[in-house]
């Protein structure tokens, strides 16, 4: 039988595990890029819920944010296409270091350039693997690679995306969809 103290620890650990597995974010709406901060200073005392939900910043100063939440492969393709890229599937790829995680690798052609996409079964596993990518992309965990050009890794949702090259427009395109790269290059 659980004592009261053990029950509290159990409930806390289950809650933390649930948040970690689901990839929940505790950000407020005003922290979301493209959303305007909400101010209650100039509202009348009888403000309705609709008034509270309306940004007080004039619409002309808001930046439109046609973002697509990236979870998996399909959302990545949709987001790249929405950003104006030509995207075509180009086959499967195997990265032996990722096989132990049961990852399905795919190559897509983005504006004619190969980009590798690795979709994990869940975001938690992807986070564990992406945290092991070296800052210069030369290794994942204990496996070292000899790339033909500069490796650029991104990680978001269940995906790790790899573009090998230095084309600034390609790096900017993928960063616009996936966020800042995991790898850093000077």
Image (tube, helix red, strand yellow):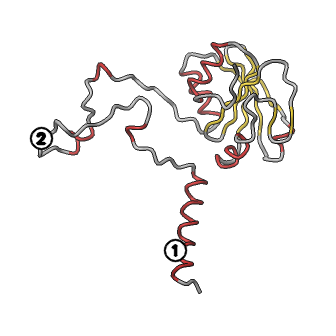
Q: Where, by quadrant of the figure, is residue 137 drawn?
A: top right
Question: In 3D space, how far apart are the residues under numbered discs 1 and 2 (Cα atoms)?
Answer: 43 Å
Relative side of 52 to 126, left or right: left
Relative side of 167 to 68, left or right: right
**Quadrant location of the N terminus in the rendered image:** bottom right
Hey, which residue is sitting farthest front in the picture?
Answer: 186
N-terminal label among 1 and 2: 1
**Quadrant location of the C terminus in the rendered image:** top right
* Residue at mark 2: 44
Hey, which residue is sitting farthest bottom in the picture?
Answer: 1
Q: Position of residue 119 (x, y in %)?
A: 70, 39
Identify the secondary structure beneath mark 2: loop
Identify the secondary structure beneath mark 1: helix
**Residue placed most toward the observer, 9 or 23:** 9
Q: Position of residue 136 (x, y in %)?
A: 75, 28
Q: Residue at x 78, y 47 (%)?
A: 101
Decide: is 115 above or below 72: above
* Residue at mark 1: 8
């Amino acid at each position: 039988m659980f004592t009261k103290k053990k029950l509290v620890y159990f409930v806390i650990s289950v809650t933390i595990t649930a948040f970690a597995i689901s990839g929940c974010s505790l950000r407020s709406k005003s922290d979301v890029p493209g959303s305007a901060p909400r101010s209650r200073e100039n509202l009348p005392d009888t403000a309705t819920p609709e008034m509270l939900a309306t940004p007080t910043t004039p619409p002309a100063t808001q930046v439109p944010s046609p973002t697509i939440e990236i979870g998996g492969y399909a959302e990545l393709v949709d987001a790249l296409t929405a950003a104006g890229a030509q995207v075509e599937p180009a086959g499967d790829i195997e990265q032996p270091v990722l096989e132990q995680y049961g990852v399905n690798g795919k190559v897509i052609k983005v504006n004619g350039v190969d980009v590798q996409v690795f979709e994990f079964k869940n975001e938690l596993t992807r986070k564990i693997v992406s945290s092991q990518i070296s800052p210069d992309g030369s290794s994942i965990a204990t496996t070292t690679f000899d790339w033909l050009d500069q490796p650029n890794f991104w990680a978001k949702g269940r995906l790790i995306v790899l573009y090998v090259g230095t084309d600034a427009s390609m790096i900017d395109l993928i960063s616009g969809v996936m966020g800042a790269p995991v790898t850093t290059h000077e």
